[in-house]
Amino acid sequence: MKTNGLKELKNTMQITDKFLSSTDFNNLQTNIMGDYFPWFYNDHKVYKGDNKFQFTHRLYDEENIRSEHYYLILPLLKKLNIERLLRVKANLVTRTSKLEVFKFHIDEETNNPALRTAIFYCNTNNGYTLFKKSKKKVKSQANRLIVFPGQLLHTGSTCTDHNARVVINFNFYPV
C-alpha cells in the first residue's frame, strides 16, 4: 500500500501509520480534542440498553454533511479514495479504571462485499480495536488508519492511561 493514499482495497485489513501529514494531523487533533469541539452524549455504545455510554459527533450521515466541523476530515477523505460515503462519526470514550471491551458489531448492515470501514485514531492510548474472527488487536496510535471489509465483526475498548480514547469511524464504498 502506498503512503500517499489507499489505491487498492482488497478483502484484507490495511493499517497505515502516519496517515496524514504532520500539518493535517495536528490541525485535526488540536480541533477534535480541543475545548470547543462539540461532543454529544449517547446512552449506549453499540446497542441500546448495553449499559455503556460514549460521546459522539456525526460529521456525515444519510448522504449529507451533518457538522460544521466536516472540513476537518477533508484530508482523510481525499486519501481514502471514496466513491460513495455513507457515514463519518467521531467517537469519544472516557477513561475507565480497568480496560473495558465493548460488544462485537458491524457498522452497516449490508451484503455488499465492497463496503469498507475505516478507523482513524486521534490519540495514542492503551485502548485498541479487536477483530472477532482473527482476534487481531490494533492498538490506538495517533495518526493511524485501519481499513477493513465492512462485514468484519469488530469492537473497541476504553483506555486507562489517558482521559479519553478518540477515533473517527468511516463507512464507505471505495473507488
Image (spheres, rainbow, N blue to C red):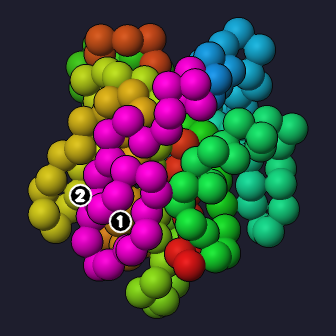
Q: Quadrant of the N terminus?
A: bottom left
- Please identify the quarter of the rendering in which residue 62 is found: bottom right
Horizontally, residue 39 falls left or right of residue 46, namely right
Does the image show residue 41? yes
Badge 1 is on which residue? 148
Badge 2 is on which residue? 131
Q: State the residue at coordinates (50%, 25%).
A: 22
Disc on the earlier residue, 2 or 1: 2
Q: Position of residue 96 (x, y in %)?
A: 35, 18
Q: Quadrant of the C terminus?
A: bottom right
The mark found on residue 125 in the picture is none
The kind of residue on which mark 1 rests is Phe
Horizontally, residue 22 falls left or right of residue 153, namely right
State yes or no: residue 34 in magenta.
no
- Please identify the quarter of the rendering in which residue 43 is found: top right
The kind of residue on which mark 2 rests is Phe
Q: State the residue at coordinates (35%, 65%).
A: 148
State if disc 1 and disc 2 touch (CB < 8 Å). yes
Check the image and report above or below for 52 versus 119: above
Horizontally, residue 19 falls left or right of residue 49, namely left
- Please identify the quarter of the rendering in which residue 72 is found: top right
